[in-house]
Amino acid sequence: SQTIHQWPATLVQPVGSPLSLECTVEGTSNPNLYWYRQAAGRGLQLLFYSVGIGQISSEVPQNLSASRPQDRQFILSSKKLLLSDSGFYLCAWSVNRLGGYTFGSGTRLTVV
Amino acid sequence: EDQVTQSPEALRLQEGESSSLNCSYTVSGLRGLFWYRQDPGKGPEFLFTLYSAGEEKEKERLKATLTKKESFLHITAPKPEDSATYLCAVQATTGGFKTIFGAGTRLFVKA
């Protein structure tokens, strides 16, 4: 069966520090991968998606970047965190771009 | 602009008290509508996909229905373990495969 792993679960980082969140999927090949951010009381905001290794599409210009170095690995990064980067970050995968997603357990990021 | 609006923002029910959550959407053309359940501090869990008006899906005490402008998630005889936030999302036929999420309805079921 397919599983998705996301870590860390919580992270407290100072302003200006770098960020690296990792997500891996097991039990499938060539998944579509997504990074979402969820703010309290608001819908999930799509940050990046990838349909294959090295293929990254950005939905919202911001202080973050994403990379897909391996088929089932998706990384969210920042060189210098801002206070506004705080939030709940979710990785997800799908078989294709139509259909429901399987989400990871999320990372609660607090920038102080 | 494509939009998804969920109501109410929060709903408090007694155990066994059936009710419905609403998801209204505005898209140029609907490719699919999705319902998720999200427990506090966790990622959303996929529940249903609906593709066309008149379609219905069921899972235990949950039943999702779809019209041309909205979807309902009916909860029959809820239990405390049904307490969660329920998210609705739509994917339009235009604008690529972008999925738009609503803000969710927080459901509280009291024993």
Image (tube, helix red, strand yellow):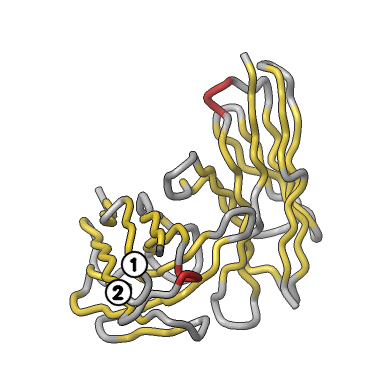
Residue ranking furthest to the left: A70
Amino acid on which the number 2 mark rests in the picture: Ser
Check contact, mark 1 vs mark 2: CB within 8 A. yes
Mark 1: amino acid: Pro
Residue A90 position (above or below residue A30): above
Quote the CA–CA distance across marks 1 and 2.
Answer: 6 Å
Coordinates of residue A104 in the picture (x, y in percent): 35, 53
The residue carrying pointer 2 sits among few (fewer than 14), some (14 to 19) or many (20 or more) residues within 10 Å by Cα, namely: few
Quarter occupied by the C terminus of chain A = bottom left
Query: What residue did someone put label 2 on?
Result: A17
What chain letter is assigned to the residue under label 1? Answer: A
Query: SS class of the residue under badge 2?
Result: loop
Which residue is located at x 46 percent, y 70 percent? A83
Could you tell me which residue is drawn at 36 percent across and 81 percent down?
A65
Q: Nearer the viewer, residue B32 or B85?
A: B85
Q: Measuring from the top left, give residue B92's x and y in whole percent.
A: 65, 73
Q: Secondary structure at mark 1?
A: loop
Q: Which mark is residue A14?
A: 1
